[in-house]
Amino acid sequence: MPGMNNIPNDFVLSVVIPVYNEERTLARLVDAVRAVPIRKQIILVDDCSKDGSRAVMEDFADDEHNTFVKLRHDVNRGKGAALRTGFAAATGDAVIVQDADLEYDPAEYPQLLAPILEGKADVVFGSRFMGGAPHRVLYYWHSVGNRFLTTLSNWFTNLNLTDMETCYKVFRTPVLKEILPSLQQDRFGFEPEITSRVARAGLRIYEVGISYNGRTYKEGKHIGWKDGFRAIWCILRYR
């Protein structure tokens, strides 16, 4: 797969980061995003955080390779709503979803972009379950739930994904803009909904294995069992 040297100098990646109460990790995450030697538009969407996340966001400034867009919701609307707000502001050649915690490694952007830059893919999913990359060992039932939801989604979309619920999804910007008006889910239902939308659109979808440094609920993990039931509803709703 192409490395940094294969990314065109004029290529711009829009990185959309939904932020909700991520004061502890946000600065380190953004530093990691900035360190990736690709021209980037970094779009931060504060979903009405109750901690100091907004103040942390204000400290970020443009530099030679990174341009910041800082947006805010006046009420908490959920991850899906924050992503739609960020997608609408994206102007790069490709768009990637990046959580504001430290579970996913921005250093892996080049390998995620490779199928798009090679002209093979319209959408790339970063799979935590393809093997070959380090993973923090955490909750067994979470992994069972993720695999169940992916299997159920595959049943209705006729895709053979291994990780539908992954954060890392990369889109060619034109295809994302076409899908954007149809997106409806405000919370974690975004994952099955966007998967169904790209499948129904007949887009070229690739998966790339990624590492995963999951966090515990004590460390700030937000998703819960109610979101799992919502995901099932969304899979059936958008089948």
Image (tube, rainbow, N blue to C red):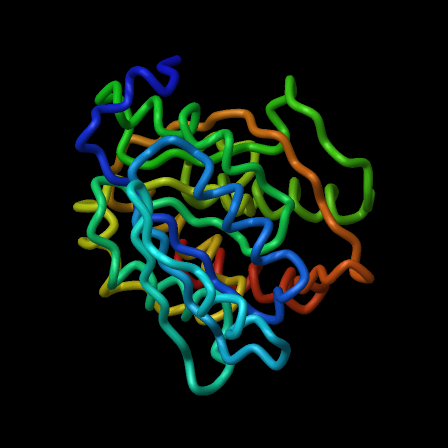
Q: Is residue 1 left or right of residue 75?
A: left
The total of numbered circles placed on residues is 0
User: Which of the 4 image quarters holds residue 60?
Assistant: bottom left
- View extreme (bottom): residue: 74
Q: Is residue 214 left or right of residue 78?
A: right
- View extreme (top): residue: 1
Q: Which residue is found at the position 73% from the left and 42% from the top?
A: 143
Position in image of residue 13 (x %, y %): 30, 41
User: Which of the 4 image quarters holds residue 225?
Assistant: bottom right
Residues 205 and 196: in front is: 205
Eyeballing the image, is 45 above or below 48?
above
Q: Which residue is found at the position 48% from the left and 49% from the top?
A: 98
User: Which quadrant would the N terminus be assigned to in this image?
Assistant: top left
Q: Is residue 144 left or right of residue 119?
A: right
Position in image of residue 108 (x %, y %): 49, 29
Eyeballing the image, is 41 above or below 115?
below
Eyeballing the image, is 152 above or below 230?
above
Q: Which residue is found at the position 25% from the left and 19% from the top?
A: 118
Position in image of residue 5 (x %, y %): 32, 16
Residues 137 and 197: in front is: 137
Position in image of residue 76 (x %, y %): 51, 81
User: Which of the 4 image quarters holds residue 116?
Assistant: top left
